[in-house]
Amino acid sequence: MSYLEQKKALMLKINEIASMQRSAVQEADMQKLQQLIDERQRCMDAIDAISDDSFDHELADIIEQIQDIDKETHSMLEHMMHDVDDKLGSIKNTRIGLIKYNAGVSQIPPAFVDKKM
């Protein structure tokens, strides 16, 4: 198998991994996503180890497909992070409100305090 064929095979595997990463993000399966990231990095390391600079149209197409999938996955992750941020903000606001409420409830209104004490 030539260096170019090895690169194509690895890039096709990365393309498959990129699709699985997109699915993992859609399913919010962060453990699976991390495993896929590690697997993808191993493929990238294998490509880096190939010391050949050969490149062709087919390889360029594979790389473009991977980039398109990565853009979509990145967009989904960004949306997910905004959702998490919104939920955390809501929790924080609820917590602040609860603290203020509890502080107000725990105080004895001045009208009920016996002034003779």
Image (cartoon, grey):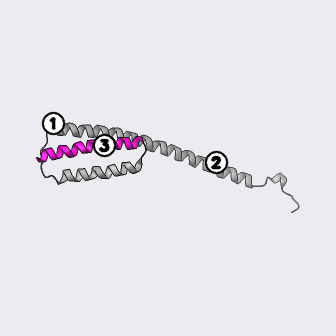
Tell me which numbered mark, 1 or 3, is placed earlier along the sequence: 3
Closer mark to the observer between disc 1 and disc 2: 1
> Where in the figure is residue 85, as x and y percent of width and height?
49, 45
**Residue displayed at 64% across by 48% down:** 97
Mark number, residue 97: 2
Mark number, residue 57: 1
Compare residues 65 and 111 and report the one nearer the observer.
65
In this rendering, position of residue 76 left or right of residue 89? left
| Quadrant where the image shows the C terminus | bottom right
In this rendering, position of residue 38 left or right of residue 79? left
Q: Under tag 2, what secondary structure? A: helix
- Give the main secondary structure, helix, strand or loop, of the magenta stretch: helix
**Residue type marked 2:** Gly
Q: Which residues are magenta?
A: 1-27
Q: Which residue, given by chain and number where applicable, does mark 3 sit on?
A: 18
Closer mark to the observer between disc 1 and disc 3: 3
Residue 77 versus residue 49 in the image, above or below: above
**Residue type marked 1:** His
**Residue type marked 3:** Ala
Tell me which numbered mark, 1 or 2, is placed earlier along the sequence: 1
Q: Under tag 1, what secondary structure? A: helix
> Where in the figure is residue 71, as x and y percent of width and height?
32, 39
Tell me which numbered mark, 3 or 2, is placed earlier along the sequence: 3
The reply to whether the magenta stretch includes residue 25 is yes
